[in-house]
């Protein structure tokens, strides 16, 4: 019967083998056709959460349960290394931490902040600072890619689409703004940022320098071409950082030739051939950028050699692109300040640490920064920048539309309006009033609208040129420019009540006003001294010959021009709620014209905006008239110069009487 | 650039060797006394009948020495000559434990037998394929470039760090596995009987195993070191080459002191958590005292380079992109105090100015008279050099003024060789041969300096020579070798008593304790912020901040008392814990500083290794001796 046992055993083995085969086949087919499909639809794979890193996954699996312990030890070590200024080791440790905890947002954000802020601030040289800012941001962008989810989120599809992490994207934009756009050394940082976006072959100092009979010098033709293609960078270096000669500018390019860049390392040149350095892979580039979007969205495009053809590429535009990208995972706006609490929580994400309304305002805010910084650097309109002292002949550069401030401000105003409509801030109501207040919506909309007007652009341009002349010591030219700018600026202020009431704007214009006073005093010093002496002489009886009696320094002290109130200070406006001011002015203007009769029915240009305004050295008796520049603004500005408000003027002003 | 050698624990010095030896005798003796008492009592209790019948003389002497040592330890703590008394007790205890071993070494041990066991161990290690673990390094060589980010100037530093980080665990794990499992496996499989029944001392087996595995590990380390070196040097970036692809031979000052600050040994605290550096500004000085200068300096004709890497702490934000801080470096005879040095420097500056002005005037006159301008320039140069030389001879001082120090950048100031033949080479009247006074100068265009200068003892040194990087890289790996041998020694010693897994865990545990040795020493010193563990716990529960004083209550007195007991116990315990961090010399290699054969490798690493392993070897001897395995003797 042994044979029967053997047969049974054999049968059993065959049955088991067949069962195993069948189960494996079934499980394989089930996995292939059902589970994988479901995993794709339900987005259960690791790849659904974002980019996958094989090394990171391998390390996590190898460490099994001790991953948390390892990450904690490394975290502690990272803090210790930071205190010990061992930056190179810190970089290694930080990378290890993020590889161990790739799906935990805090390590990415904290450690990138650590590198970009805490480490960079310890470095003395701007190049070193820039390197660590870039390292921090690159780390965060890697984290963002790991949390990117489905980049097609938001497109019409039945399957579940995981959104990216809005906060990580937001912080990328925010770090760009804070560490490059507004840092203490922002001019250098922004210049380095621009260098990172320029082909290394184009900024190669060896190409720009030449050796001639007279020695080593800059090749003027190549340098002129460099200026034409990079006017903002050259102008910043010349005007903001004070590089007076082409040699100094090229030396700056040379000293910073090895900074992180969008391009591959420069290849050695072949004689007579214009080199073109290829772009790095999108993920390796610095500045790091989100994936490209259609060109009509005005998006910094990492796949193109020039970040944008429609706009002047800079750090603010890059930050705006990240802010735009951070909006994609948010639920669609509902026309109300609050988000709909029933939004699809699988498909959308909202920021954890910030009010959604404020979060949504950042793209518009950064567009305003784009415009503001164009003007700060002297880019207003088609006049561009006239290079007078760097090249052999006067050359005008940067005349393209992308360098014009007007369209940039208009885009900012448009973005703000759209933001207002999307979030219901354009309507009145208790809830919207609160949201309007904490987003400072009214002021920003008003600022963007006001700054985008041709008068404002022109006035800003005159003020900028006047300031440049003042710094160069060309006082009469500076005074002429300030003289021309002030009426235009007054018109802008009077026709935009919200803008007029914004303390920052008022302080800025009052500073200009003081500078205007200063150049006026310097330009008319002789005349003013005589008038002042004459007035002093007339005040005393019998009139003493002060001109003979006083020492020169005593005579100078007689000219108390610095205490004189300026035209803006002497302008009083009738207080009307800002939203109604335009309507009231229109009515008053119409009534006045009607009163003057048919002959005067056509309004004088700017007449309407100057309605409800008086120019008076003494405050009007009616307390509804307010000074356009209130005392608190004057005190703030004066305190910056170590001065205080003169008592008689303070006593005379209506606000101080209160 | 950040090529700074940061040494938070100074390497041992030859001058401290007698004291270290004394400490070692005391600590090892204390451990030996404790071990003898516990082991002796255990032996007497378990072998009472045997002890009662025959009590060998050597054991009587051992017991006598142990009782003597224990009594002296008890009496010696707190006594006036406690150091000498405790050392005597330590010697007695060590004599007691080695009384059996030393005669054996000279009479019974045969190196041929030990070597035979070592060869067997090598063969076993090769057959067991444990050494295949080393191939793990191939992964590092292949993929490190992908995952190691670096700035060009950090390339060498990062690669060195990655290679050390990768090789260390590989070798430590191999050493622990080899050392921990072999003897227990031999005992479990009873294959040890084939050896111990031969005329072989049990301890020869331990030594043979240690030696054999040591050879395997050393060969593995040598091969991987050469491979790592090739990996390192295959493509060094020029910036990295300039920065750290070298081995600077530094002559450090013997002391860093401060003048004008609250404490002589410390500068100002700027609030940094890591207080490795002290800061000076304004009228304060950092003074490096060089007790002895190398003899060859007097014969040198080239300027003598001094290198520095300082930290700058900015006092205010700068409106322009400035870098650097202007500093003065005064090289002056060590006999002079700071006020005297200041007076000398003032006089020197005045006289130098006058003499140089006279030279310039004479040169102008000569040119005015129509003399050849080249001849006049040469005369002027020679005259100025003579003025400088005369000044150095007269004042025994030399000054570098307004030197721009850049934050964390390795920079060089040079002193004329004449100075070193004038100031002498050795200390006189207890004062150093040369003092280097560093002070901060006013920032140009401002009322005062725009920052403070952060200095540490090892931030400033005389650059004696520069040696090749490759040799230094290999020297660094000798330090690693010491740590591997320590792990092997621990594992082998534990395996004489415990089974394989327990031995492995014990060795790893003790080794890892050693990694945290610095932290434990800090806790044991009582200097940790917030007090000892109980006080810290009290602060934690009462939400009291670290720096705030606690209310003086009876509870606090009890807590502090218990903390001091804990600290005393911890200090004693720390004598058993190895100091592992001293073996990791990548700090030197990565930053381009030479590792000295004598001071760092031999004294600080090798002697320490031997001193640490000897007590473990003695323990291993006794543990092996009293295991129940057939004994030929």
Image: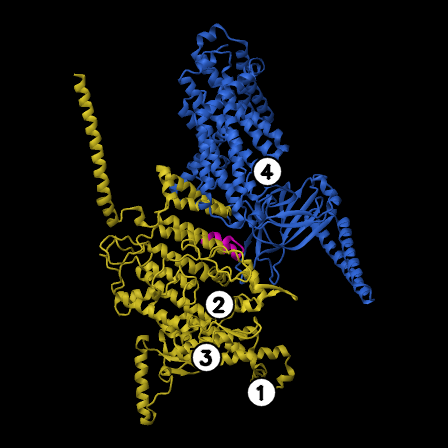
Chain colours: A yellow, B blue
Q: Nearer the viewer, residue A442 or B269?
A: A442
Q: Disc 1 marks which residue? A: A541
The span picked out in magenta is A116-129
**Marking on residue A235:** none
Q: Position of residue A286 (x, y in %)?
A: 44, 56
Res B573 visible: yes
Cα gap from disc 1 to disc 2, whole angstroms: 69 Å
Q: Disc 2 marks which residue? A: A229
Which badge, 2 or 3, comes first in the chain's sequence? Answer: 2
Q: Give the letter of the chain under mark 2.
A: A
Front of the two marks 1 and 3: 3
Cα gap from disc 1 to disc 3, whole angstroms: 39 Å
Q: Nearer the viewer, residue A502 or A172?
A: A172
Is residue A130 toward the left or the right of residue B397 in the image?
Answer: left
- In the rendered image, the residue lying farthest to the top is B53
**Marking on residue B471:** 4
Cα gap from disc 4 to disc 2, whole angstroms: 51 Å
Q: Give the letter of the chain under mark 3.
A: A
Identified at 57% across, 55% down, the residue is: B451
Q: Position of residue B403 (x, y in %)?
A: 64, 54
Cα gap from disc 3 to disc 4, whole angstroms: 73 Å
Query: Is disc 3 placed on a helix, strand or loop?
Result: helix
Task: Confirm whether circles 4 and 1 share one chain.
Answer: no
Which badge, 1 or 3, comes first in the chain's sequence? Answer: 3
Q: Nearer the viewer, residue A183 or B395?
A: A183
Q: Local crowd at mark 3 within 10 Å, few (<14), some, or many (≥20)?
A: many
Front of the two marks 2 and 3: 2
Identified at 49% across, 39% down, the residue is: B163
Q: Nearer the viewer, residue A376 or A518?
A: A376
Query: Is disc 2 placed on a helix, strand or loop?
Result: helix
């Amino acid at each position: 019967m042994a044979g029967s046992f053997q047969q049974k055993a054999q049968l059993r083995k065959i049955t088991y083998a067949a069962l195993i085969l069948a189960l494996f086949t079934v499980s394989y087919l089930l996995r292939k056709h059902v589970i994988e499909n479901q995993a794709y639809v339900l987005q259960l794979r690791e790849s659904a959460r974002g980019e996958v890193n094989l090394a990171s996954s391998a390390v996590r699996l190898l460490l099994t349960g001790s991953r948390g312990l390892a990450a904690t030890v490394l975290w502690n070590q990272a803090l210790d290394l930071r205190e010990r200024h061992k930056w190179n080791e810190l970089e290694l440790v930080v990378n290890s931490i993020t590889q161990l905890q790739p799906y935990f947002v805090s390590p990415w954000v904290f450690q990138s902040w650590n590198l970009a802020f805490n480490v960079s601030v310890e470095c003395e040289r701007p190049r070193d600072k820039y390197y660590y800012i870039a390292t921090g941001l690159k780390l965060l962008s890697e984290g963002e890619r790991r949390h990117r989810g489905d980049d097609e989120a938001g497109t019409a599809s039945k399957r579940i689409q995981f959104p990216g992490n809005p906060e990580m994207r937001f912080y990328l934009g925010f770090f760009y703004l804070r560490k490059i756009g507004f840092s203490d050394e922002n001019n250098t940082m922004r210049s380095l940022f621009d260098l990172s976006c320029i082909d290394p072959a184009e900024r190669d100092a060896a190409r720009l320098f030449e050796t001639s009979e007279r020695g080593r010098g800059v090749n003027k033709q190549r340098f002129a071409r460099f200026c034409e293609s990079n006017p903002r960078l050259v102008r910043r270096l010349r005007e903001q950082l004070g590089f007076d000669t082409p040699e100094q500018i090229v030396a700056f390019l040379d000293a910073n030739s090895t900074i992180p860049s969008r391009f591959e390392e420069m290849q050695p040149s072949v004689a007579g051939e214009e080199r073109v350095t290829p772009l790095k892979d999108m993920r390796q580039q610095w500045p790091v950028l989100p994936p490209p979007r259609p060109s009509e969205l005005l998006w910094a495009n990492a796949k193109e050699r020039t970040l944008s053809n429609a706009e002047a590429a800079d750090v603010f535009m890059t930050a705006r692109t990240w802010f735009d990208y951070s909006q994609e995972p948010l639920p669609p706006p509902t026309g109300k300040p609050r988000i709909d609490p029933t939004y699809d929580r699988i498909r959308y994400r909202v920021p954890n640490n910030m009010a959604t309304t404020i979060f949504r305002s950042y793209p518009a805010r950064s567009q305003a920064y784009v415009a503001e910084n164009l003007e700060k650097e002297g880019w207003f309109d088609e006049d561009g920048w006239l290079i007078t002292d760097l090249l052999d002949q006067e050359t005008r550069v940067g005349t393209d539309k992308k360098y014009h401030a007007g369209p940039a401000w208009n885009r900012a105003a448009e973005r703000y309006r759209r933001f207002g409509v999307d979030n219901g801030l354009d309507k009145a109501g208790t809830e919207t009033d609160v949201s309007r207040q904490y987003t400072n919506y009214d002021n920003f909309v008003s600022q963007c609208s006001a700054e985008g007007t041709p008068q404002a652009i022109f006035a800003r341009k005159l003020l900028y040129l006047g300031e440049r002349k003042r710094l160069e010591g060309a006082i009469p030219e500076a005074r002429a420019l300030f003289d021309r700018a002030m009426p235009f600026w007054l018109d802008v202020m009077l026709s935009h009540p919200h803008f007029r009431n914004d303390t920052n704007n008022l302080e800025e214009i009052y500073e200009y006003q003081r500078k205007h006073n200063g150049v006026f005093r310097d330009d008319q010093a002789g005349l003013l001294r005589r008038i002042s002496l004459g007035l002093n002489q007339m005040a005393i009886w019998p009139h003493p010959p002060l001109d003979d009696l006083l020492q020169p320094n005593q005579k100078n002290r007689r000219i108390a021009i610095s205490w004189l109130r300026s035209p803006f200070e002497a302008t009083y406006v009738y207080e009307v709620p800002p939203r109604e001011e335009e309507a009231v002015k229109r009515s008053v203007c119409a009534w006045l014209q009607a009163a003057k009769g048919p002959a005067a029915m056509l309004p004088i240009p700017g007449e309407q905006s100057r309605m409800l305004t008086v120019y008076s050295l003494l405050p009007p008796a009616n307390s509804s008239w307010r000074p356009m520049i209130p005392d608190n603004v004057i005190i703030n500005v004066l305190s910056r110069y170590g001065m205080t408000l003169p008592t008689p003027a303070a006593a005379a002003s209506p606000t101080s009487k209160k | 650039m950040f090529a700074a050698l940061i040494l938070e624990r100074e390497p041992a010095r030859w001058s401290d060797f007698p004291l270290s030896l004394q400490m070692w005798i005391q600590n090892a003796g204390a451990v030996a006394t404790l071990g003898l008492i516990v082991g002796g009592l255990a032996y007497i209790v378990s072998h009472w009948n045997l002890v009662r019948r025959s009590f060998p003389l050597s054991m009587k002497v051992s017991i006598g020495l142990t009782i003597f040592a224990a009594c002296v330890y008890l009496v010696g703590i707190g006594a006036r000559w406690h150091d000498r008394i405790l050392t005597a007790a330590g010697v007695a205890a060590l004599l007691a434990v080695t009384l059996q071993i030393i005669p054996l070494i000279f009479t019974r041990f045969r190196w041929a037998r030990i070597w035979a066991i070592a060869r067997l161990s090598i063969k076993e290690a090769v057959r067991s394929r444990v050494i295949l673990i080393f191939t793990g390094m191939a992964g590092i060589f292949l993929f490190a470039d992908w995952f190691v980010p670096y700035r060009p100037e950090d390339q060498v530093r990062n690669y060195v760090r990655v290679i050390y980080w990768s090789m260390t665990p590989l070798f430590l794990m191999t050493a622990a596995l080899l050392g921990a499992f072999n003897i227990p496996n031999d005992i479990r499989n009873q294959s040890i009987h084939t050896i111990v029944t031969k005329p072989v001392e049990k301890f020869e087996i331990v030594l043979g195993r240690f030696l054999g595995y040591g050879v395997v590990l050393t060969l593995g380390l040598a091969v991987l070191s050469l491979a790592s070196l090739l990996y390192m040097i295959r493509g060094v970036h020029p910036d990295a080459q300039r920065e750290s692809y070298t081995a600077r031979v530094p002559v450090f000052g013997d002391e860093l002191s401060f003048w004008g600050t609250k404490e002589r040994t410390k500068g100002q605290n700027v609030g940094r958590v890591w207080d490795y550096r002290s800061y000076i500004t304004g009228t304060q000085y950092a003074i490096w005292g060089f007790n002895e200068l190398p003899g060859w300096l007097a014969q040198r004709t080239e300027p003598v380079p001094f290198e520095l890497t300082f930290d700058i702490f900015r006092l205010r934000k700068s409106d322009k992109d400035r870098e650097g801080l202007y500093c003065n470096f005064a090289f002056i005879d060590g006999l002079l105090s700071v006020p005297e040095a200041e007076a000398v420097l003032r006089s020197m500056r005045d006289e130098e100015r006058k003499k140089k002005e006279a030279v310039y005037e004479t040169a102008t006159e000569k040119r005015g008279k129509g003399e050849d301008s080249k001849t006049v320039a040469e005369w002027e140069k020679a005259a100025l050099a003579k003025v400088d030389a005369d000044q150095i001879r007269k004042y025994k001082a030399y000054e570098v003024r307004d030197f721009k120090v850049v934050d964390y950048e390795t920079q060089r100031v040079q002193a004329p060789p004449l100075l070193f033949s004038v100031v002498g080479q050795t200390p006189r009247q207890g004062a150093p041969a040369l003092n280097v006074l560093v002070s901060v100068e006013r920032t140009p265009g401002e009322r005062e300096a725009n920052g403070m200068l952060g200095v540490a003892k090892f931030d400033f040194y005389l650059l004696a020579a520069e040696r090749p990087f490759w040799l230094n890289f290999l020297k660094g790996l000798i330090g690693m070798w010491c740590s591997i041998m320590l792990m092997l020694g621990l594992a082998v010693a534990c395996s004489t008593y415990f089974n394989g897994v327990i031995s492995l865990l014990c060795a790893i545990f003790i080794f890892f304790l050693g990694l945290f040795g610095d932290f434990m020493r800090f806790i044991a010193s009582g200097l940790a912020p917030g007090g000892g563990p109980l006080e810290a716990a009290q602060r934690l529960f009462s939400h009291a901040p670290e720096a705030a004083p606690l209310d003086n209550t009876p509870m606090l007195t009890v807590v502090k008392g218990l903390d001091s007991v804990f600290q005393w116990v911890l200090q004693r315990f720390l004598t058993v814990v190895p100091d592992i961090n001293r073996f990791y010399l990548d700090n030197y290699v990565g930053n381009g500083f030479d590792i000295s054969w004598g001071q760092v490798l031999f004294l600080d690493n090798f002697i320490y290794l031997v001193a640490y392993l000897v007590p473990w070897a003695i323990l291993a001897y006794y543990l092996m001796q009293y295991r129940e395995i057939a004994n030929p003797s």
